[in-house]
Image (tube, helix red, strand yellow):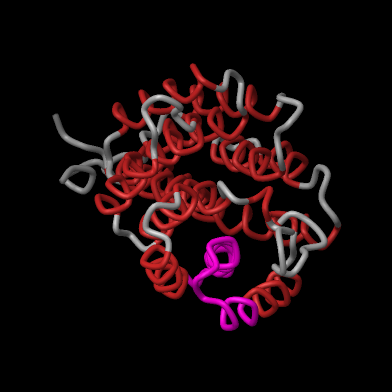
Amino acid sequence: MPTSLTTTFTNRILQGAAATLLVLALAGCSTTKDRMTTGSVPKLTKPVEEMDATELRSATGRLGQAYEKNPRDPVTGVNYANLLRMNGRDTQALAVMQQVAIANPGDRNVLAAYGKAQAAAGQFQQALDTIGRAQTPDRPDWKLISAQGAILDQMGRASDARQRYRDALDIQPNEPSILSNLGMSYVLTGDLRTAETYLRSAAGQPTADSRVRQNLALVVGLQGRFPEAEQIARRELSPQQADANVAYLRGMLSQQNSWQKLAAKDKTPGAADGSNTN
């Protein structure tokens, strides 16, 4: 059966958007998040995902200095690597976690963070193996199971990924981060209606954070409901953060506008003659 160029073009947009946001969700899912103020590690004034670019750079600098003083400390190393990934410095984050993992080979939190750094750097199979070593069958961690799902999605194994999300939901029902990842899994395969169902459920949970709502905004926008998408993107954020998120959203949706123009051309008489198959 011939494949439409418009379908191919749309799928590429969706895959790029969802893969990016799955990476962000994976980076933000830190197993040591509640240990940010432990010991001599510099205290952070707000959650990492709520920081703007200036705050992220400042926090990364402070954690970097602490890491230089004691590169073997697992809390410092993991938190520094998380901040590096939030700044887009995935290669450096992986190098940090390699050193921390060597110094702490039996630390479950370190192994989990190392696996996430590998995934962010594109080493998907290695990431699955590392996170698998961090998991304990008698007391499975739903965050690690969901992280495995995100990695499987990036490997194109949607069915396996969704099963991992459902396994995680069996342990932690209605967890918004799992529901969000499950929704974005459907974005990767172009099923926006199902994706929106899961993302609305995620956004409606009391513990949902802004990242969940940004995922929902993207999916709503990709369906052409741009004013609604922008309204969702601006909720519960500072004006600066909202402007940044809306700018990103518009950038993603500008590609959707290109798809709409191509779709219109695809429907014009004669446009399908040989140009609409591959």
Q: Position of residue 48 (x, y in %)?
A: 69, 58
Q: Is residue 91 above or below residue 265?
A: below
- Residue pictured at 51% horizontal, 36% vertical: 143
Please give the range of residues in magenta: 64-89
Q: Position of residue 150 (x, y in %)?
A: 41, 41
Q: Is residue 74 above or below residue 223?
A: below
- Residue pictured at 42% horizontal, 60% vertical: 117
Q: Position of residue 273 (x, y in %)?
A: 19, 43
Query: Main SS of the magenta segment?
Result: helix
Q: Position of residue 229 (x, y in %)?
A: 69, 40
Query: In front here: 53 or 71?
Result: 71
Q: How many marks?
A: 0
Q: Is residue 158 left or right of residue 139?
A: left
Residue 60 visible in the current orientation: yes
Query: In front here: 95 or 272?
Result: 95
Residue 258 visible in the current orientation: no
Q: Quadrant of residue 277?
A: top left
Q: Is residue 122 above or below residue 197?
A: below
Question: Is residue 82 in the magenta section?
Answer: yes
